[in-house]
Amino acid sequence: MQRAALLDAARSLLSEGGTEALTFPALAERTGLARSSVYEYFRSRAAVVEELCAVDFPVWAAEVEAAMAAVDGPEAKIEAYVRTQLALVGDRRHRAVVAISAGELDAGAREKIRAAHGGLIAMIVDALAELNHDQPRLAAMLLQGIVDSAVRRIELGVEDPGAVTEAAVSMALRGVGG
């Protein structure tokens, strides 16, 4: 229960204040634990983020997969893939995971995150193959690049998230020609 409380506090801190907000003293304060107790559960901030990814990413991926399974046809699946990921940007689970840069994580943590993203990309390969892409895996990685760019635009808060989502869906389905 303490570990879950620490992860919940970490999500809140990262979501509210970004990387700088995630400190062991802040985690201790949020959970009512002594700072030394936080170190019993996690050795570093990177370890906290690694566990957040391990816990939250599968939930996020399952939501994307469920949205894709609820529709028929490759184009509808691509649209669901893009829309669901962008809808999850406001979810604090997602915001917490992206709040800390991968550069602060050790190689093992970065590899786990890459593998998780690979699983997400694998979800869309079949739909792209149905559309007769010569290289559906490459197309899936490029499609994820569109999603990742849209995520960054939404997080910046400069454009309306709905407009960013519509532009990303349009680009995913029709390319730069709109």
Image (tube, rainbow, N blue to C red):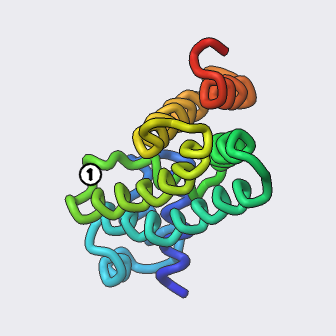
- Identify the image quadrant of residue 154: top right
Q: Position of residue 50 (x, y in %)?
A: 37, 65
140 w.r.t. 152: above or below: below
Which residue is located at x 55 percent, y 87 percent?
Answer: 1
| Left or right, residue 98 beside residue 88 | left
Q: Residue furthest left?
A: 107
Question: Callout 1: few (<14), some (14-19), or many (20+) C-alpha neighbours within 10 Å?
Answer: few
- Identify the image quadrant of residue 45: bottom left
Q: Position of residue 138 (x, y in %)?
A: 40, 39
**65, 94: nearer the viewer:** 65
User: Which residue is denoted by mark 1 in the rendering?
Assistant: 104
Q: Residue furthest bottom?
A: 1
Q: Position of residue 80 (x, y in %)?
A: 71, 46
Decide if residue 127 is in sight here. Answer: yes
Disc 1 residue type (three-letter) = Glu
**76, 168: nearer the viewer:** 76
| Left or right, residue 12 beside residue 98 | right
Which residue is located at x 56 percent, y 31 percent?
Answer: 150
User: Total marks drawn?
Assistant: 1
| Left or right, residue 51 beside residue 78 | left
Q: Secondary structure at mark 1?
A: helix
Decide if residue 86 is in sight here. Answer: no
| Left or right, residue 50 beside residue 73 | left
**22, 92: nearer the viewer:** 92
4 w.r.t. 90: above or below: below
- Identify the image quadrant of residue 82: top right
Which residue is located at x 67 percent, y 31 percent?
Answer: 169
Q: Position of residue 178 (x, y in %)?
A: 67, 15
